[in-house]
Image: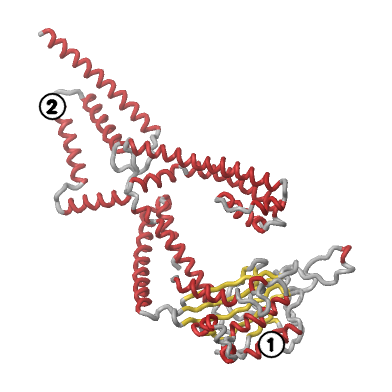
Amino acid sequence: MVNPHMYYLNKVMSSLFLDTSVPGEERTNFKSIRSITEFWKFMEGPLLEGLYWDSWYNNQQLYNLKNSSRIYYENILLGVPRVRQLKVRNNTCKVYSSFQSSISECYGKYTSANEDLSNFGLTSNSEWRYSTSNTNSPWHWGFLGVYRNGGYIFTLSKSKSETKNKFIDLRLNNWITRGTRVIFIDFSLYNANVNLFCIIRLVAEFSATGGIITSWQFYSVKLLRYVSYYDYFIASCEITFCIFLFVFTTQEVKKIKEFKSNYFKSIWNWLELLLLLLLKSTEKYSDFYFLAYWHIYYNNIIAITIFFAWIKIFKFISFNKTMSQLSSTLSRCIKDIVGFAVMFFIIFFAYAQLGFLVFGSQVDDFSTFQNSIFAQFRIVLGDFNFAGIQQANHILGPIYFITFIFFVFFVLLNMFLAIINDTYSEVKADYSIGRRPDFELGKMIKQSYKNVLEKLRLKKAQKDEDKKTTKDSRDLAEQARREGFDENEIQKAEQMKKWKERLEKKYYSEEIQDDYQPVTQQEFQELFLYAVELEKELHYINLKLNQVMRKLSAL
């Protein structure tokens, strides 16, 4: 699904369209655009030259731009690029009464309710008229808002001169207004050498506070999946995977029918269910963004599926002592960790709110509450900007930083490690006295081995052994009656034997189901009675032994 060529193609394209400077202004490129003037300079400069590289060759500038021109030879522009603008209406924000006399226009932030749908400017051309979306592309989630499809759209020409004249005409007639909130530049490329499509979206968001925030998306995807022999090999692997998936699903359905509600008590069954749920004209603008978006979404689902598939390996290596100790430690201390997490995040979010309110207007890392949370995680890991915090507030900055480090890093994190360390010590102590959990794979191998022996008649079946044991017990009881033992003594002996077998099966069996073997009230009573009977038997044996010793001494 992903290969190194995707990274290199994205890197080449981003270097071309993001890092190329405006002629005569080395510091101005798409990343550094902050005004409408700089935006038009980019459109008429680096973007125009990047999209229409053939004119460079015709103007004999290929020698000076040898490295850049090679990029164009290796990639083909699919269709023509498209430029799309979204605007907001006037009076979409409320002006304070004292300023209403001097402020007649007010353009708020972008929302679907504030969007301007009316035509403006030179209404004879399509770029001045609002167009609804005719594609199924998802809405764009930007830095300043979530933007829907449609807007004021125009496609570029295949001629460089026509496109440049179009840009100049739009600039002179003020196509970008105070109500403009975002402009999208979409186009797609294809590289036949590596069979990859590169879908590019350049975004310029116009903030209601003024200025421009730029962002970009480069999606390198393989839409033509089966071309080479290796691709067909991957296809065969996918078919095999689908077969396994069908068999796997059938097995899980049978388990659910068999165990019903008990099926959902195992964390491994939840993991298996999660895995199953995750497996689900040249003159016009070619909208590859929709395909690229869902292809990337599909790749993300596959990535998460593979992640949980790797986690599932723990289930099959539980026969290893170290692995079983790890899983036992985590399962035993989960309640303590949850309780600690509540206390930790109360303090953590309190500091995040403090950082946002104190430094949010001056430090980028604390500009939003979400950024404050991530900034604090970075502080815990040692990545922080103390100079920025101190400069924002000379008094509260150092106090915030020192107290956060003390309480969160030195106190709370060490408490978390202490919980895990104490639980690990308990688990290790249990292992040292032989209380080990049931090993899934080991049990399966052992059971398979027993089944093979039984089928080869090298070992008697368990049912036959149980019948034989029951028969032997009955024979011993009959023999005791013939020899004159009291019926009460025989019943007590049988009861003690049942207690012994039950205790051995529960507490001394090799097939222990869990680290902890809780004792119920009934089991405690049985243990107590068993201990009393053992004490009586011991007292009776001591009396018999004393009688024998006295007789021996008399002789």
Q: Which quarter of the figure is the N terminus placed in?
A: bottom left
Residue at the far front in the pictured view: 64
The label nearer to you, 2 versus 1, is: 1
Distance CA(mark 2)–CA(mark 1): 116 Å
User: Mark 2 falls on what kind of element?
Assistant: helix
What's the mark number on residue 166?
Answer: 1
Residue, x 60% and y 74% (percent of image)? Answer: 19
Answer left or right for 38 relative to 13. Answer: right
As displayed, is residue 377 above or below residue 159?
above
Q: Earlier in the sequence, mark 2 or mark 1?
A: 1
Residue 271 found in image quarter: bottom left
Residue 290 in sight here:
no
Crowd class of label 1 (few under 14; some 14 to 19; many from 20; radius 10 Å): some
As displayed, is residue 332 above or below residue 356?
above
Answer left or right for 473 relative to 101. Answer: left
Residue at the far left in the pictured view: 555
At label 2, the amino acid type is Arg
- Along the line of sight, which residue is nearer the eye, 28 or 267? 28
User: Mark 1 falls on what kind of element?
Assistant: helix
As displayed, is residue 89 above or below residue 454?
below
Residue, x 45% and y 59% (percent of image)? Answer: 274
Instruction: Tell how many labels.
Output: 2
- Along the line of sight, which residue is nearer the eye, 189 or 480? 189
Q: Which residue bears the numbered disc 2?
A: 482
At label 1, the amino acid type is Lys
| x and y, in percent, of residue 218 in the image | 55, 73
| x and y, in percent, of residue 338 in the image | 52, 45
- Along the line of sight, which residue is nearer the eye, 108 or 193? 193
| x and y, in percent, of residue 343 in the image | 58, 43
Answer left or right for 186 relative to 554. Answer: right
Identify the image's colour scheme: rainbow, by chain, secondary structure or one colour.
Answer: secondary structure
Q: Which quarter of the figure is the C terminus placed in?
A: top left
